[in-house]
Image: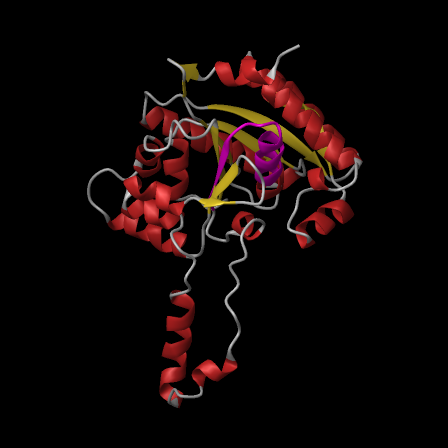
Amino acid sequence: TISLDDVIDRYTLGGKTIMKTIAIYNIKGGDGKTTTAKHLAVGLSKKGIRILLADADGQANCSKSFIDKKLKRDPAYYESSLDGDKEAAFIHRYMNQDHGATISTIFESPKAVSSCIQHTSYANLDIIPSDLTLYLADTKLRLSDGTRENKLKRATNFIKNDYDYMIFDCSPVKSLVSVNVLYTEPLVIIPVSPADDSMQGLALTLNEINALKDLYEDLDIDYRILIVKRKDNIEYRENIAEIRSAFGGKVFRTMIRDQSKPVEKAVRERKTVLDLPSSSIADDYRNFLDELEVMLHD
């Protein structure tokens, strides 16, 4: 039996934790990246492992699960504006929402990473939130001079002794933000709901990882595939068999079954299915976490 201490000890040196990174990544959207990231972060934190969850998607769905960022609606806000200024007032209001420091801040100043971290209601789980300004950060990166791919890598140096794992929930959009995540040399977990278009998405995702490894020859990026089984039909069964044949031990044995009602209930309550009464999908995530811990130890 492998203990939790054994898992953590693998990443310690001289008594200090060496924080490892995990990226939940897939170029195709809708295959369960955010759900996987949330359950992985919450599940590991419940085991006493110190987790920093970083929302690297401008849609910020992961952030919304842990932090209330809603701007209070106020139609009267525009009453004092002239007709021609109402559009400008709207743009200003929503461009300047006070979400505090977000992951976008790190791309301006990696050493400011600590100011971006917020506590969640879960012990051992903190989060770096995101918002739509992350898309502006990507544009600024593309226009900037000098190194552009190592901002997140530099930021991890300032917090590497504070957490056991940093988990990134990545956007499906190919961007320099995603390049920054991969440049931290994470274990990449690729959730795949194996319809035919998802098979192409998996191929494109792996091609992207390999292209970065070719470009930066010193990068060490490993990956594993997590099957999210949303249907039980011939197409899914054949595609699952093909994935297991092509990738062997790179595929988790555990498959996550789709149960929309428990997941929807958890989202409404800003929880995960791990917080609700036992269900088959909660059992799937627990089995996945157990399998991941063993893999990290080996």
Quadrant containing the N terminus in the rendered view = top right
Quadrant containing the C terminus in the rendered view = top right
Q: Residue at x 79, y 40 (%)?
A: 277
Q: Residue furthest left?
A: 145
Q: Residue at x 55, y 51 (%)?
A: 61
- Horizontal and vertical percent for residue 254? 70, 25
- Horizontal and vertical percent for residue 26? 53, 38
Task: Compare residues 4 and 189 and report the one nearer the observer.
Answer: 4
Q: Which residues are magenta?
A: 36-56
Residue 260 appears in the picture as rendered: yes
Is residue 95 rendered to the left or right of residue 165?
A: left
- Tell me how many marks there are: 0
- Horizontal and vertical percent for residue 274? 70, 37
Above or below, 254 against 115 in this view is: above
Is residue 259 rendered to the left or right of residue 223?
A: right
- Horizontal and vertical percent for residue 231? 76, 39
Within the image, what quadrant is residue 38 found in? top right
Is residue 218 rendered to the left or right of residue 191?
A: left
- 42 within the magenta span: yes
- 214 within the magenta span: no
Task: Compare residues 182 and 103 and report the one nearer the observer.
Answer: 103
Q: Residue at x 37, y 72 (%)?
A: 92
